Image: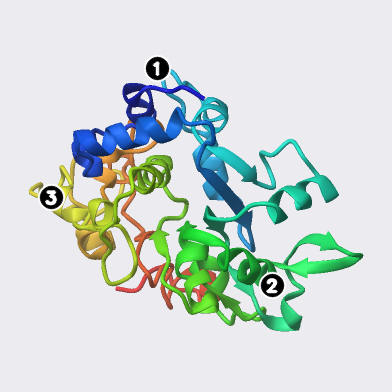
Amino acid sequence: MNITRRQFLKYCGLSAAALGLNPMDLKAIETLLTASGAPLVVWIQGSSCCGCSISLLNRISTAAPKTVDELLTSTIDLVFHPNLMAAAGSQALAEIKSVANYILVCEGGVPTAFGGRACTVWTENGLDVTYGDALKELAAKASKILCVGQCASFGGICASGSNPIGFMSVPSFLGMQTINIAGCPAHPDWMIGTIAQLLAGQTVPLDSYGRPTSIYGRTVHSRCPLRETEEAETFGVRNRCLRELGCRGPRTSADCPIQKWNNGVNWCVNAGAPCIGCTSPDFPGTASFYSGDGGGGDD
């Protein structure tokens, strides 16, 4: 159960200043982590590609804890996660029924057509339980609700186009305020960093879309290293701003230029691709190829 402040923050990949944590907050985290009962986390998956779980699993550090399994076994008490928990079946269901006052992490949104039966999460008393019904039950016992990824936060790709399954985001379905870690997928440090703030007992400042302002407070373009460079007229030319080629960085809020991806190795624009705006509430947009109209962008 023991983990140092330094180890936890190194794993997050964020400095205390970036998280908005002061020494008292760090002390509070250490006290929680060394207590007899680790903070409880229930992670439930609805309709999605599981990309945010994969993003979390891809977080690897050279400092202890080095992998996500060390984080989950040494830092929090992960009561339920469909892909990561050891228990299964009735044993897993008994675990989730026995706890309360946990951080509820929601990955994936809610299909509402067909009585919600397009997405079921477990079987109880011989009956399939829909994701929507499970959400209502779990949300009532949660201390905080954290939506990870675009599908849970705003609908994302699953809600685009004709939306034949009546797909809804978690906050829309529940009619409740949630903390939304937007992205397709969400960055692992965004998820872990926000949980760190909650462990410190902090109130996480949110923007009008329920996103933490520490992550989504500025646009991608405002911190892009190519901002002041010459505008590109075609793709494949290095070190040119892609704004005129459809880059959505000027209207997309995220810290990708600073945080980067793949453990700080690279990010979309630096790899020669435009920002696709995957953290924006309207992603992928009405004119995206996901909508079936043949469009490639919304400009």
Answer with left or right where residue 164 lies relative to residue 262.
right
Judge the density around disc 1: few (<14), some (14-19), many (≥20) Cα neighbours within 10 Å: few
- Identify the residue shown where x is 55% and y is 58%: 106
Closer to us: 65 or 119: 65
Q: Earlier in the sequence, mark 3 or mark 1?
A: 1
State the separation of the CA atoms marked 3 and 1.
Answer: 33 Å
State the separation of the CA atoms marked 1 and 2.
Answer: 40 Å
- Res. 227 mark: 3
The residue indicated by pointer 2 is 133
Say which element carries label 3.
loop
- Identify the residue shown where x is 51% and y is 33%: 58
The residue indicated by pointer 1 is 63
The quarter holding residue 113 reads: bottom right
- Identify the residue shown where x is 39% and y is 72%: 282
Answer with left or right where residue 218 lies relative to residue 4.
left
Three-letter residue code for mark 1: Ala
Closer to us: 115 or 162: 115
- Res. 42 mark: none
Q: Is residue 252 visible?
A: yes
